[in-house]
Image (cartoon, rainbow, N blue to C red):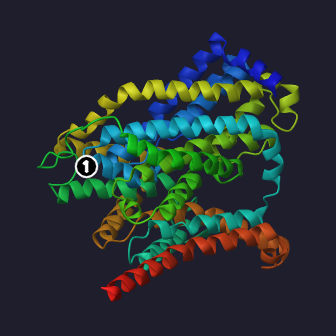
């Protein structure tokens, strides 16, 4: 391994590859900030550019820089506009945007940058140490385990439900699962619930749904409630009170960053999981671990609630390179495009990559350390200027949000019908917000719904029924974990209620 690290250092520190790291991080960060333009789109566009470089190492370093740069920069629009730039930063908006509305946009962006840097760096260390061993672990996961993993993801709804909102959260999750069934099914290539519209045959776009659930209702609320938003009458959220977080906040974030770096990385290792699931699970785990006032602060501007998903999604982004490089298995749509780029460059990813072309394998890993440092250096000085977006007058800010929302939905599918779907779902989401229904469970249900159905159908076919639950111990273990995650909040609430009653009786 030490020999490989030295080879990687010499390759990654060449002038050409350093320039590739910086260029990839710059492009990725900028694209990640724009709602709707995720890393998949820009990497697909840049493959011809990468191929013309001729050097597989430089090409992969450039594309990898774009990938984790987009995840790093995607938090900006989530925090400032409640419009997630990429799927992996949806959970960032849950506490990042409330912090921005409190006038703490600068601090929120700083926390996001530090957490992203820590998650990406720790993930790169774990990748360097465990990549060969983890490739065999990833092979142990079959359709049954992925189905159970999706159920664990769905169990996170308990973390997004406030007091007395478990039933509402469950209803929203079911609605998300229903929306995920629109389009061609897992068992038969037949359109379902498309109402005869060809544009719905491929299903509802995630970007469209994310914009409809968060960005569009926010713009409507700014119109309906003039005292809300970036330029409220009291001026509280118009001021940028500071970029630094306190020593107490740093102490609170440190264990969260440590836990979510490891958890996010291992989730990223699993093909099909990725940064989005890692960020939701990271948020859910930290909310369940929090107690008392800390737990109540989640969703209202919690430092832990912001650090958890930002750490997890960047660590998962790094972890996704394990199956890609060591097995040749893409873990997400983005890594599938990266796999295509590798093949086009005559590099065959797999178990022999480390021995046949060690300069490619180790140079990419070393470039991740450099890339995360570059991202931190690029982003921290820009935070005061980026945060000033919130000082834009409301009559300009609303069209700004609407423009990026509509543009993101249209570019995602290049289809005008998406705009009609966006408006329809946006109005529905606004009504749900008025009725105090949590929107995050709907998005979780939608994201996991397709993968849940695909893996469940495949498991049923392979094992001729539900026998796979008992025949595969790992599947049973994951389902038990999901049940614990669902029941734990109710158990803790019941204990707290009994304790309160005991105190009252003692008085």
Q: Quadrant of residue 481?
A: bottom right
Viewer-closest of 258 and 86: 258
Q: Position of residue 325 (x, y in %)?
A: 76, 37
Q: Quadrant of residue 188?
A: bottom right
Would residue 173 be seen by someone viewing this image from the given angle?
Answer: yes
Q: Residue at x 32, y 67 (%)?
A: 433
Viewer-closest of 301 and 73: 301
Judge from the rendering whether residue 413 lies leftward or rightward of residue 323; answer left or right.
left
Viewer-closest of 39 and 2: 2
Q: Kindly give the residue lying farthest to the bottom in the view shown.
A: 505
Q: Quadrant of residue 400?
A: top left
Q: Kindly give the residue lying farthest to the top in the view shown.
A: 15
Q: Position of residue 371 (x, y in %)?
A: 57, 26
Residue indicated by mark 1: 102
Name the image quarter holding the C terminus.
bottom left
For mark 1, give the secondary structure. Answer: loop
Judge from the rendering whether residue 241 lies leftward or rightward of residue 33; answer left or right.
left
Rendered view: 397 above or below 478: above
Q: Position of residue 365 (x, y in %)?
A: 69, 30
Would residue 42 be seen by someone viewing this image from the given angle?
Answer: no
Q: Residue at x 88, y 28 (%)?
A: 355
Q: Residues within 10 Å of mark 1 (few under 14, many from 20)?
A: some
Judge from the rendering whether residue 452 lies leftward or rightward of residue 118; answer left or right.
right
Q: Residue at x 50, y 37 (%)?
A: 72
Viewer-closest of 489 and 29: 489
Q: How many labels sit on residues?
A: 1
Q: Residue at x 34, y 50 (%)?
A: 97
């Amino acid at each position: 391994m030490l020999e490989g690290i030295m080879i990687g250092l010499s390759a990654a520190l060449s002038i050409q590859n350093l320039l590739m790291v910086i260029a990839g991080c710059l492009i990725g960060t900028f694209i990640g900030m724009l709602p709707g333009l995720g890393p998949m789109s820009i990497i697909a566009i840049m493959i011809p550019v990468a191929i013309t470089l001729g050097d597989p190492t430089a090409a992969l370093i450039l594309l990898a820089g774009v990938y984790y740069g987009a995840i790093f920069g995607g938090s900006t629009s989530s925090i400032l506009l409640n419009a997630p730039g990429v799927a992996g930063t949806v959970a960032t908006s849950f506490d990042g945007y409330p912090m921005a509305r409190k006038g703490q946009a600068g601090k929120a962006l700083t926390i996001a940058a530090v957490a992203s840097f820590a998650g990406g760096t720790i993930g790169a260390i774990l990748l360097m140490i465990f990549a060969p061993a983890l490739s065999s672990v990833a092979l142990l996961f079959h359709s049954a385990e992925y189905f159970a993993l999706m159920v664990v993801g769905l169990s996170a709804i308990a973390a997004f439900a406030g007091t007395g909102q478990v039933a509402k959260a469950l209803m929203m999750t079911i609605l998300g699962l229903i929306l995920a069934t629109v389009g061609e099914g897992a068992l038969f290539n037949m359109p379902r619930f498309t109402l005869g519209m060809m544009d719905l045959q491929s299903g509802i776009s995630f970007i469209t749904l994310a914009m409809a659930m968060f960005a569009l209702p926010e713009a409507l609320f700014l119109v309906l409630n003039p005292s809300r938003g970036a330029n409220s009458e009291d001026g509280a959220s118009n001021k940028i009170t500071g970029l630094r977080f306190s020593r107490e906040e740093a102490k609170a974030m440190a264990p969260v960053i440590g836990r979510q770096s490891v958890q996010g990385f291992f989730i990223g290792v699993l093909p099909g999981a990725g940064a989005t699931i890692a960020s939701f699970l990271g948020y859910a785990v930290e909310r369940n671990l929090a107690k008392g006032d800390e737990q109540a602060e989640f969703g209202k501007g919690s430092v832990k609630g912001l650090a958890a998903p930002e750490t997890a999604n960047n660590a998962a982004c790094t972890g996704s390179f394990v199956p890609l490089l060591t097995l040749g298995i893409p873990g997400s749509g983005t890594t599938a495009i990266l796999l295509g780029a590798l093949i086009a460059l005559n590099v065959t990813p797999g178990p022999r990559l480390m021995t046949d072309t060690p300069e490619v394998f180790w140079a990419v890993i070393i470039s991740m350390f450099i890339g995360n440092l570059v991202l931190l250096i690029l982003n921290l000085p820009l935070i005061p200027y980026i945060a000033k977006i919130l000082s834009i007058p409301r009559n300009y800010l609303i069209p700004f949000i609407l423009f990026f929302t509509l543009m993101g939905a249209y570019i995602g599918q290049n289809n005008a019908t998406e705009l009609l779907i966006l408006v329809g779902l946006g109005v529905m989401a606004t009504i749900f917000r008025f009725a105090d229904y949590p929107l995050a469970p709907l998005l979780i249900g939608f994201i996991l719904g397709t993968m849940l159905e695909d893996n469940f159908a495949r498991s049923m076919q392979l094992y001729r029924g539900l026998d796979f639950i008992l025949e595969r111990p790992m599947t049973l273990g994951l389902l038990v974990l999901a049940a614990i995650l669902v029941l734990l909040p109710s158990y803790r609430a019941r204990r707290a209620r009994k304790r309160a009653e005991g105190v009252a009786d003692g008085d």
